[in-house]
Amino acid sequence: MDRFSASEQGLGYIYQPRFALLKMLEMSESTSVLIEKDDDLDFVDASGVKTLASLKHKAVGDRITDLSVDFWKSVNIWIHRYTAQDRNQSNLRFFLFSTATVSSDSFLRHFLPDASRTDLEQELWVTAVDALGICQSKLLLPIQEALSKFSDLEKEDFFARITIFDESPRIVEIPAIIKGKMRTVRREIRDAVYERLEGWWNDLIVRLLSGQQEDPIHNHEISDKLSSICEEYTPENLPITFRNLLPAEEIDVESDSRVFVQQLKALGIGSTRIRNAILDYYRAFEQRSAWARENLLVSQEIELYEDRLVDEWERYREVVFEDLNEDSAESVLIDAGKEVYRWAELGSGNMTSLQIRARVTEPYVLRGGFHILANHRPTPRVYWHPSFLARLQNAVGAKP
């Protein structure tokens, strides 16, 4: 690897939220977490015990040795937190999670979770202080000075609170591990559920880091969100993932030449309502594509759904257009078209028969569905202005 590369450091920042999600799923629902407060991660359990966790995402093959900077930099942080909370009266634990491996000949192996300390010639805290004593690194001198202010009992208590978890999962390994814990989630939807859960989780982390949220994230919030996401993947439901999303390109009502937009312009619909229609079209179209990619639709489900929309539109259209004829004034035709469009935009949402599935009530699915039909090529399957189809055909026929 290029010695000037910052890839591992960059991965380290992304590693924190992903690793936090993994650990929270392994902990009690009463646990809460903060990020970048007293350490990389702060976990607090129901009894008030706080675990300060340092995370180290290292290059493949890295080792942790006696004077490993990663370990001692974490110790430096922990000493300050320990001192600030009355030392041995504090409720702190200190965890180091590293993707590196503790060297077999390092005394740090005695900090591993299942390590035995019976083969030590002296107490672990003494060994740690002695290791520091032979080092002349300026980086470690402040640690030596801080420890010199501790009594022997406090040194023993401090180092007894430390656990090293080496060979922790790397960032690319964590998604598979999390999905493996989703035993109650159907296997065919685990990828989609994980992506939704991590997206929601990352948004929460951004709120924490930006100061928009000060309270810790509670584990029961993760359970509730996971349950909520899974409920969208039942036979009566479909996930809604494009609410409030905007297209990549700026919406330009005036220059948009798509047929469904031209239909609305033919009625004199205002630009704000047309913009809303463009958003509904975009969200519905992208949502359908997402459902298809995730194999959530049954055979011909979209086609049959569109047939239902067209059928109801035809019924309402016939009622509104019943008294119109070829001599009707343009203003009358426009008013009739507006009435049909008003029904599609607002009134049709009250009809449960027009929901693609029983629990899919998101308005853009239905409204966008009508706009997709109004944009159908070569001929729109729904239209609003009574003469729109005839005028469209004449315009096409008039082309050389």
Image (spheres, helix red, strand yellow):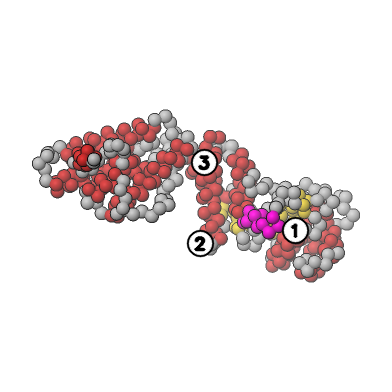
Query: Which element is circle 2 on?
Result: loop
The residue carrying mark 2 is 212
Taking depth in this image into account, of 346 and 138 the one nearest to the observer is: 138
Where does residue 370 sit, x and y in percent of width and height?
Answer: 31, 41
Q: Is residue 208 visible?
A: yes
Taking depth in this image into account, of 115 and 373 the one nearest to the observer is: 373
Q: Which range is magenta?
A: 2-13
> Total marks drawn?
3
Quadrant in the rendering for residue 86: bottom right
Q: Are marks 3 and 1 in contact (CB under 8 Å)?
A: no
Please, what is the three-letter code of the amino acid marked with disc 3? Ala
Gap in angstroms between the C-alphas marked 1 and 2: 32 Å
Query: Which element is circle 1 on?
Result: helix
Q: Is residue 12 visible?
A: no
Residue lying farthest top? 299
Q: Residue at x 22, y 51 (%)?
A: 268
Q: Residues within 10 Å of mark 1 (few under 14, many from 20)?
A: some
Earlier sequence position, callout 2 versus callout 3: 3
- Left or right, 265 with respect to 276, comes to left
Taking depth in this image into account, of 159 and 383 the one nearest to the observer is: 383
Tag nearer the camera, 1 or 2: 1
Where does residue 51 sit, x and y in percent of width and height?
Answer: 67, 56
Gap in angstroms between the C-alphas marked 2 and 3: 28 Å
Q: Residues within 10 Å of mark 3 (few under 14, many from 20)?
A: some
The residue carrying mark 1 is 71
Earlier sequence position, callout 3 versus callout 1: 1
Residue 77 included in the magenta stretch of the image: no
Gap in angstroms between the C-alphas marked 3 and 1: 37 Å
Please, what is the three-letter code of the amino acid marked with disc 2? Gln
